[in-house]
Image: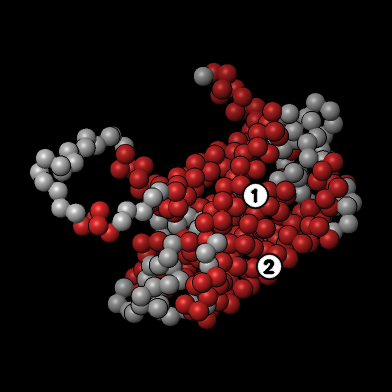
Amino acid sequence: MDALIARISKDFADMKEEIKTDEVVDQWPLLNPLIVASIIIGYLVFTLKIGPEMMKDREPMSLKLPMIIYNAFQVIYNLWMFVAMFSTPGAITYLIENVCVVNSDKPADNWGHPLYYAMCSFGWYYLVSKVLDLFDTIFFVLRKKQSHVTFLHVYHHASLVFVGWAFVKFIRGRQGVLIGFINAFVHTVMYFYYFLSALGDAVKPFLSWKPYITKIQLLQFAFIIAYLSSLLVFDCQLPKVYSYYMLANGILFFYLFLDFYQKTYGGKKETAPKRKRKTSDAQKPQKQVAIPGSDFFKVITHGMSFMCFPGLQDELYNDDDES
């Protein structure tokens, strides 16, 4: 235990030494800690308190057009981020050559690198995308889909705003840019599906590829796990606290999304006769003994279904009330 505490203390100390200030980047919009804190607090207060109370005695808002516009913008913005990485001269080469700068060699002082501000910009674009993602929850509240506003959903969106801000503010254009680069591609596909779903019944025949979105997300988490593990194994120049946190989240999300995929798409559907068949008392299943903590885990797993992919639930855009 003492060794673990000592290692954690060292990692925090190393992170503190690696943090540098940059007067140019620090003046960029959203990097003021008071602004990002206000965004997160305002988001939490509205989605958990003000919004539900405001909608309590009102009919759900019909936001079909705003949601179509929002999802279309998300597709364009995330696709632009993804393409921008490829179109920036030397960016891909830089990421490949600097995917791991070993701590024992020389510091990864990319503050003087010609692509430094380009990499910081990519991180800032990612931060903006996480702020935009907060509207996912706002739409839930205004459409009175408060059951979708789970703890994990809110935690996920709020925490990624903080993580995106901390990355640009303190870590700046390091190897972590690659994760945002992959995430932009995944979100392009995801919001394109949301956009089509929001169009209504006319496009339903073209939405049979829904399961592949979860597969793409699983591949993303698998990549993040492998990538961050390699950074830790080879002692690369990236703050260990950041790497451990992102690795833990990647493992958790991969497991829960895999569980969600297996339950949603992997099981065999029962036939109607089987469901309607009457059984005698002898044939009735015996009452199962509850496993301590199992109910809590089910809540966590269910909440995860709406966390990053709430739109994959059929009721999100194709409700009976057409809200």
Front position in the image: 163 or 101? 101
Q: Quadrant of residue 227?
A: top right
Residue placed furthest toward the top: 2
Residue placed furthest toward the front: 273
Q: Quadrant of residue 105?
A: top right
Seen at 48% across and 55% down, the residue is 307
Q: Is residue 167 at all visible to an observer of this figure?
A: yes
What is the three-letter code of the residue carrying label 2? Tyr
Callout 1: SS: helix
Front position in the image: 117 or 188? 188
Q: Quadrant of the C terminus?
A: bottom left
Front position in the image: 207 or 184? 207
Seen at 70% across and 33% down, the residue is 230
Q: Residues within 10 Å of mark 2 (few under 14, many from 20)?
A: some
Q: Which residue is mark 1?
A: 166
Alpha-carbon span between mark 2 and mark 1: 21 Å
Q: Residues within 10 Å of mark 1 (few under 14, many from 20)?
A: some
Q: Are marks 2 and 1 in contact (CB under 8 Å)?
A: no
Q: Where residue 64 sits: x, y (%)?
A: 49, 79
> Quick check: 315 left or right of 24?
left
Q: Which residue is mark 2?
A: 77
Number of marks in the rendered image: 2
Foreground mark, 2 or 1? Answer: 2
> Quick check: 285 left or right of 117?
left
What is the three-letter code of the residue carrying label 1? Ala
Front position in the image: 250 or 126? 250
Q: Where residue 248 sits: x, y (%)?
A: 55, 38
Callout 2: SS: helix
Q: Where residue 318 sits: x, y (%)?
A: 43, 72
